[in-house]
Image (tube, rainbow, N blue to C red):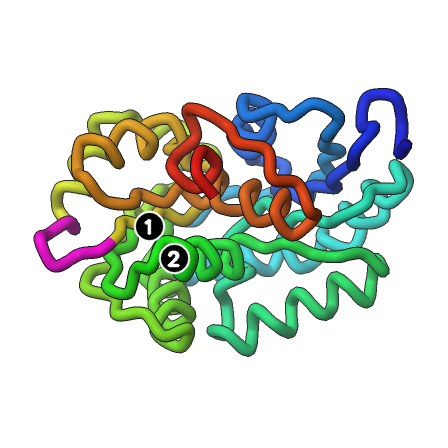
Amino acid sequence: MTNVGGSRAVFGVIVPSTNTVVEHDYWRAALPGVTYRAGSMYIPNPVMGDDEDFQGLLGQIRAAIDTAVRDVLTAEPDRMVMGMSAETFWGGVAGNAAFEQRLRDRTGLPVTTGASSCRAALRKLGCRRIAVFSPYQPIADREVGRFFTEAGFEVSAITGLRCPTAMDIARVREDRLRAVVTEIDGPDVDAIVQVGTNLSFVALADRLETELGKPVIAINAATLWNALREHGFDDRVEGAGRLLREF
């Protein structure tokens, strides 16, 4: 027993200090005996209004991650989950692998990231041609597209909402998310993929899968699914998409 609340596992979750969605999404799909201990990466300047600003935001993430990891480790977690997605796509497949290895070396724990989780989800669902959207600027969308292409998927479309600040990501309303899905979807698209963990999309993605008749992958649902399955838990969860409900 890890502890009374987390009798099965405690997952350490690393999130930017501006993120208000990851923990909400994980807890809304709460499993008996699995708890989450979040560590914050301090973001003093959340502006991300253009490519230069976005690179500055990543610099803040990289400067703060070691402290966030240090804090989470005091709770003695069983797994580390990266609750911020852009950094996990940076540098393509090799960049993601290197990031995961650094985090494993730093913690001595198994690691789950958003990029690897989306790849695993698409493979599980048998999807090849995908359309992707994010809250990012073009510089980050290029890295996301690079990752998926190198991972063997055909990216038919990728678009960013170009949110001006990190907090504004969580303020994007459902009607805007529906509109962007309509923009990038098509009959030749096997799956819609959303990245950007502070974008609230899990519940809407679940509904859109029924409406569109195809997988709609929200990165927070995919990451939680992958973390649970990699850890040996096969619990099924309703209301968070096909992955957690069926696989």
Query: Which element is circle 1 on?
Result: strand
Residue beneath disc 1: 193
What residue is pinned by disc 2? 122
Residue located farthest toward the left when viewing the structure as drawn: 187
Place of residue 18 in the rendered image (x, y in percent of width and height, measured from the top left)? 57, 35
Local packing at callout 2 (Cα closer than 10 Å; few below 14, some 14-19, many 20+) is: many
Name the foreground residue: 135 vs 108. Answer: 108
Q: Nearer the viewer, mark 1 or mark 2?
A: 2
Q: Amino acid at mark 1?
A: Val
Instruction: Name the main secondary structure of what is drawn in magenta.
Output: loop
Looking at this view, is 172 or 186 the one in front? Answer: 186
**For the residues marked 1 and 2, what is the alpha-carbon distance in whole angstroms?**
9 Å
Q: Which mark is residue 95?
A: none
Query: Dot 1, how many residues are within 10 Å of its Cα: few (below 14), some (14-19), or many (20+)?
Result: many
* Amino acid type at image mark 2: Leu
Residue at position x 74%, y 40% in the image = 11
Q: Is residue 102 left or right of residue 169?
A: right
Q: Earlier in the sequence, mark 1 or mark 2?
A: 2
Q: Is residue 143 above or below residue 150?
A: above
x and y, in percent, of residue 87 in the image: 55, 60
Magenta stretch in the rendered image? 184-190
- Horizontal side, residue 99 vs residue 244: left or right: right
- Name the residue at 60% across, 60% down: 59
Q: Is residue 241 above or below residue 131?
A: above
Residue that appears at 23% across and 64% down:
129
Coordinates of residue 95 in the picture (x, y in percent): 56, 74
Proximity of marks 1 and 2: CB atoms separated by less than 8 Å: yes
